[in-house]
Image (tube, grey):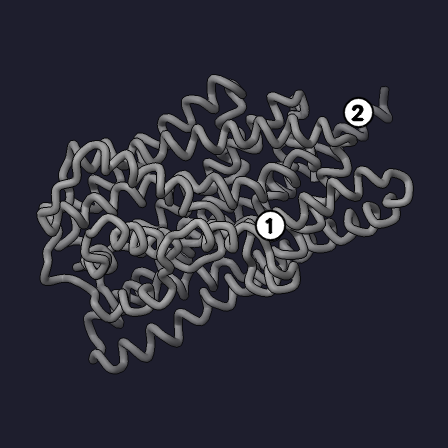
Amino acid sequence: MNAGFYRFSVCRNLNLLAMKKSNRLTTYILLSMLAGVAVGYLVHVNADPAFIKEFSANIKLLGKVFIRMVQMIIAPLVFSTLVVGIAKLGNLSAVGRVGGKSMLWFITASLVSLSIGLILVNLLQPGQYINLSQADTEGVKDLMTKKQEFSLEKFVEHIIPRSVMEAMATNEVLQLVVFSIFFGVATTAIGEQAKPVIKALDAVSHIILKMVGYVMNIAPLGVFGALCAVVASRGLGIFEFYFIYFIYFLIGIALLWVLLLGVGYLIIGARMTALLKRIGNPLLIAFSTTSSEAVFPKLTEELERFGCKDKIVAFVLPLGYSFNLDGSMMYMTFASMAIAQAYGIHLDLGTQITMLLVLMLTSKGIAGVPRASLVVVLATCAMFNIPPEGVALILPIDHFCDMFRSATNVVGNALATTVVSKWEGELDSAEAVS
């Protein structure tokens, strides 16, 4: 009895220490956000344009360093965790079952997200409030270089890796997922001979997750740099021109959150609150750095702590980053139609539904692409005879929209992983101690 009580006390104390550390990081990130906005605003109102440009470019390096440090561990983490996760599922029928449930969730969530954006943009007509004189023509030039016209050939090339090393080097998440699934299935089929490989990759995944802890220590600096740069160059006055557009977008995000959290509550019950608390840090980092990819390693760790089995997390979460970017997809229909409205272009219902289906395909595997949503919107506009340079109209406010898109992507993927764990009977009734 005393031994059992002692073990319980140790576990409780360890959990309290982990929560205190997590709360400290959250506090530092929040303070960094406020400091970034304040310093950026002071620079914006007191410095000359030449200094502002140089300052923004330099301070932005803090955010770039943080994101690049996270990006360097994404490829080995995706590969090692996904292969081990498939192997731990035990057999190919389990892989197919979990994969089927995951894709059912992803496709449904994608259609719902795209539909919310489409319905809302038709009801509220935000495009008519966009100020044509505020177009960021310089910024859109960078996007034009990344744009690719949609074709079946390009779509297939984006899915199937020409070389796994190339996919790792460029952080092509979808290509990594495809290779890892093939490798994991082959490893499972071999059986006993593959056990040393599985054990080695399991060790690699734990080493990478340890590295995550080190990288997260500089998250507040990355947050400060990212926000300071954008406020210094744009100022807070950007909201004066785009206030209505931004508010309408936030209404769409709020509706999507209500729907996602409502479905989550129906499936996992009161633990929905605990899940949101557990992913608080990843949410804040994704929000402030506008990168859902930057929190992939940390999100993996937190979902396992929440009670999701590592084999489910390792399988579902990488898939989610390729197929389940709910916030980004909602914005794609919203932004594409808003640009059409700004130019007075009317699209009938059939054309809008076609656009939705095209976006359903072209949005897959965009997690590793900077400002991926706008790149896809740019290609979509060109396809439907909407002036692609119209993306310049929404570019000035896009950073702030991207903050909410990225946070929503994190919520959607955390929820998808948790729900599939629940469906598989692999969700622990209490949070694990780490």
User: Can you identify the residue that label 1 sits on?
Assistant: 297
Q: Amino acid at mark 1?
A: Pro
In primary-sequence order, the first of circles 2 and 1 is: 2
Residue 217 relative to residue 149: left or right: right
Q: Residue at x 79, y 43 (%)?
A: 187
Specify whether residue 76 is in view.
yes
Q: Residue at x 16, y 51 (%)?
A: 242
Q: CA distance from mark 2 to mark 1?
A: 34 Å
Which of the pair 336/69 is nearer the observer?
Answer: 336
Task: Using a 10 Å C-alpha cutoff, classify the residue at mark 1 as few (fewer than 14 neighbours), some (14 to 19) or many (20 or more).
Answer: many
Q: Residue at x 71, y 27 (%)?
A: 94
Which of the pair 406/275 is nearer the observer?
Answer: 406
Residue 178 vertical position relative to residue 275 in the rendered view, above or below: below
Task: Using a 10 Å C-alpha cutoff, classify the residue at mark 2 as few (fewer than 14 neighbours), some (14 to 19) or many (20 or more).
Answer: few
User: Can you identify the residue that label 2 sits on?
Assistant: 5
Tell how many labels.
2
Name the image quarter holding residue 195: top right
Give the image location of residue 329, x and y in percent. Answer: 37, 41
